[in-house]
Amino acid sequence: MSSATVASPDPAGGSTTGTRRRLPTQARSRERVERILDATSELVLSDGVEGLTTRSIAERAELPVASLYQYFSDKEAVLLALCERDMAEMDDQVALDLAAAAERGEITLATLVETSMRAFVAVYHRRPAFMQIWMRGRTNSAIYDYGRHHNKRIAANLLAFADDAGLIAPGAFTPDELSAIAGLAVELGDRAFQLAFEHDPQGDTFLVEQAIEVVTAYLGRIDVAG
């Protein structure tokens, strides 16, 4: 299932904000970074993205502000790292759930869409601060660029998975057209989930179901069974 694994994308380059000073290598440093990210997540839920400061993050993590600055240049860098962590968890969940579905012999294009989208929802429930950051924190250009890159990577990998599984009707579209269709499907799902989770960290169940139906119906145009 190598082509189906939704690998975490490389951080988007070229941004002047959200710069991480150094990557933690020792266990103690990794534990500190996780404390910083968890504290940030808690503060986003309680105070919102706009209320964050590096000092409030450090106080919640019970660390000196100087320790935070060892790893992150500013609060925007912390938010980007939090998005990176949570998106990587989403990718892992998608890969695990698709592997389980494949082992059960349940892979169709419709089940691929539903399995992938419900995997994302499961992580949204575990990481409720993520959607607030994604919707309200995208004035941070690094977060915006990272999310766009992530969506493109998901689209490419899921398209490869569908192709390997023989789920795509042959000859109906060129490779470039298939890539565009997959990319649009991911963007549709992303936007629909933003609406579903805009006011409720658990998401509007009706809108989640509608999102799955919309993306599934759209991809019916490339479905070998369609």
Image: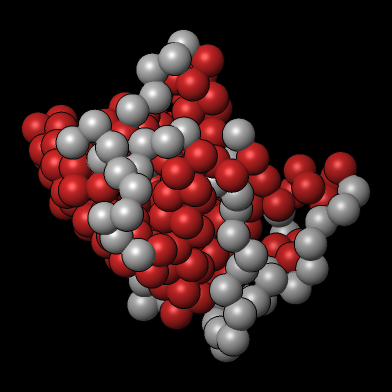
Task: Tell me if residue 183 can be seen.
Answer: no
Q: x, y (%) of residue 174?
A: 35, 65
Left or right position of 105 against 103? left
Task: Tell me if residue 100 can be seen.
Answer: yes
Above or below for 37 versus 117: below
Residue ranking furthest to the right = 26
Question: Would you identify the image quadrant in which residue 5 lies?
Answer: top right
Tell me the residue at 26%/47% (across/down): 222
Q: How is the image coloured?
A: secondary structure
Left or right position of 69 against 217? right
Residue ranking furthest to the top = 104
Q: How many marks?
A: 0
User: Toward the viewer: 180 or 33?
Assistant: 180
Question: Would you identify the image quadrant in which residue 197 lies?
Answer: top left
Above or below for 191 versus 35: below
User: Toward the viewer: 64 or 84?
Assistant: 84
Left or right position of 44 against 212? right
Question: Would you identify the image quadrant in which residue 18 lies?
Answer: bottom right
Q: Quadrant of the C terminus?
A: top left
Q: x, y (%) of residue 20?
A: 69, 71
Q: x, y (%) of residue 135?
A: 29, 61
Q: Quadrant of the N terminus?
A: top right
Above or below for 83 versus 13: above
Tell me the residue at 44%/15% (across/down): 105
Tell me the residue at 51%/39% (across/down): 164
User: Toward the viewer: 157 or 143?
Assistant: 157
Q: x, y (%) of residue 117?
A: 33, 37
